[in-house]
Image (cartoon, grey):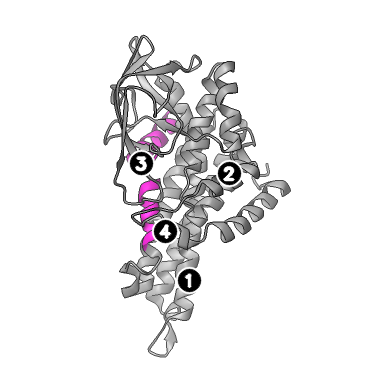
């Protein structure tokens, strides 16, 4: 059984890394922290022109792109826009709804997002209080990724005693939206206050089980995004440990640094193994996916947090300063780990999936 990527996927990964090295350097991630963030519309359109925003490009392509975007800390909503919202439309929308939105999303002319959370807490049917009645939804959703820029929102709401999905125009009547401050402004979020806002139900989604399955599928590229960030943070720490000298020697020659970075390397390689297996399971969309996805998500988030933390420590005094880059990885690791539900949710998903095997 071969879990390696195909030649085409490796070529795509290399192309994506070269493109993002030029178009999405660390300076762009830093610029997203400014009071007036940069206009990224042209970058989003160029990604669309390369075919990166097409939800039908396949599991391997989605995963290698997520890893490249994670390495670059690209401040664009690929995960929630393509891997979650567009995936929901592709799987659960009517033919007319798919025809109305998927071509525009793939072309980069419309951005989509997914509104599930209603404050803090883990995803679950009891966490959804917004109500959909007679084609209108009332409630409050926050934090919602890319809420301020999205043209369409896939929203979870209650209807007739079950949790369903619907399409919402965030600029339409009955919708008030406002930004929500996040630790990483490169992944901006917002709040949607809904007062009988018109919404169009996705007919194929029935019950929270379908939403949980969507989260499982999105968890795999999320794991790859975290893996990419962890790799980049580790590389930055190693590079600094080689160039920074203390007592006449590179600090990387001291055991305190070597052992620290070795632990990060082990965590990253474990996350890589789990992510690659999860990509294989995602491509087959079978019974192995829930366990593979949750395991990959847990291990990749843990590796990214460890790599980001030790990158700061390795850089020493400057690692804690605004002018150095380590805090960019720490911010992304913290927010990325919470986008699809926090670590507790995914650990519990892992345990639940293991119990079903016995």
Q: Residue furthest bottom?
A: 248
Percent x, y of residue 109: 56, 36
In this view, the residue in front, 79 or 218, is 79
Sequence-earlier tag: 4 or 2 = 4
The residue tagged 2 is 45
Horizontal side of residue 230 vs 129, given as left or right: right
Sequence-earlier tag: 3 or 2 = 2
Disc 1 and disc 3: Cα gap in Å? 32 Å
In magenta segment, residue 162: no
For mark 3, does the 10 Å Cα neighbourhood hold few (<14), some (14 to 19), or many (20 or more) residues? many
Horizontal side of residue 17 vs 294, given as left or right: right
In magenta segment, residue 331: yes
- Which marked residue is nearer to the observer: mark 2 or mark 1? 2
The residue tagged 4 is 31
Q: Is mark 2 on a helix, strand or loop?
A: helix
Q: Residue furthest right?
A: 7
- Which marked residue is nearer to the observer: mark 1 or mark 3? 3
In the image, residue 330 sits, relative to residue 156, either above or below, namely: below
Q: Quadrant of the N terminus?
A: top right
The residue tagged 3 is 189
In this view, the residue in front, 67 or 73, is 73
For mark 1, does the 10 Å Cα neighbourhood hold few (<14), some (14 to 19), or many (20 or more) residues? some
- In the rendering, which numbered label is found on residue 238? 1
Sequence-earlier tag: 4 or 1 = 4
Sequence-earlier tag: 2 or 1 = 2
In this view, the residue in front, 116 or 146, is 146
- In the rendering, which numbered label is found on residue 122? none
Residue interval drawn in magenta: 327-355
Figure quadrant of residue 136: top left
């Amino acid at each position: 059984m071969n879990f390696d990527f195909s030649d085409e996927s490796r070529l795509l990964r290399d192309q994506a890394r070269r493109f993002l090295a030029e178009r999405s350097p660390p300076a762009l991630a830093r610029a997203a922290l400014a009071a007036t963030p940069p206009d990224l519309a042209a970058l989003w359109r160029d990604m669309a022109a390369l075919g990166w925003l097409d939800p039908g490009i396949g599991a391997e392509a989605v995963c290698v792109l997520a890893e490249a975007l994670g390495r670059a800390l690209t401040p664009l909503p690929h995960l929630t826009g393509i891997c979650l919202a567009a995936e929901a439309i592709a799987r659960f929308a009517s033919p007319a709804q798919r025809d109305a939105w998927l071509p525009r999303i793939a072309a980069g002319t419309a951005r989509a997002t997914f509104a599930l959370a209603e404050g803090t807490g883990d995803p679950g049917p009891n966490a959804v209080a917004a109500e959909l009645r007679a084609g209108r939804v009332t409630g409050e959703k926050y934090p919602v990724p890319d809420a301020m820029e999205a043209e369409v929102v896939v929203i979870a709401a209650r209807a007739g005693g079950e949790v369903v999905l619907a399409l919402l125009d965030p600029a339409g009547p009955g919708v008030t939206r406002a930004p929500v401050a996040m630790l990483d402004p490169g992944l901006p979020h917002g709040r949607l206050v809904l007062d009988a806002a018109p919404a169009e139900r996705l007919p194929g989604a029935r019950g929270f089980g379908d939403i949980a399955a969507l989260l499982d599928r999105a968890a795999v590229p999320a794991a790859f995004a975290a893996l990419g960030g962890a790799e980049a943070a580790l590389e930055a720490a190693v590079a600094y440990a080689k160039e920074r000298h203390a007592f006449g020697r590179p600090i990387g020659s001291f055991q305190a640094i070597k052992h620290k970075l070795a632990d990060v390397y082990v965590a990253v390689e474990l996350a890589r193994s789990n992510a690659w297996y999860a990509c294989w399971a995602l491509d087959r969309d079978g019974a192995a996916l829930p366990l593979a996805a949750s395991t990959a998500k847990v291990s990749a988030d843990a590796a990214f947090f460890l790599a980001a933390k030790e990158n700061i420590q390795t850089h020493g005094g400057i690692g804690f300063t605004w002018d150095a880059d380590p805090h960019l990885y720490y911010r992304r690791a913290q927010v990325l780990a919470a986008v699809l539900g926090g670590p507790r949710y995914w650990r519990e998903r892992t345990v639940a999936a293991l119990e079903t095997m016995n």
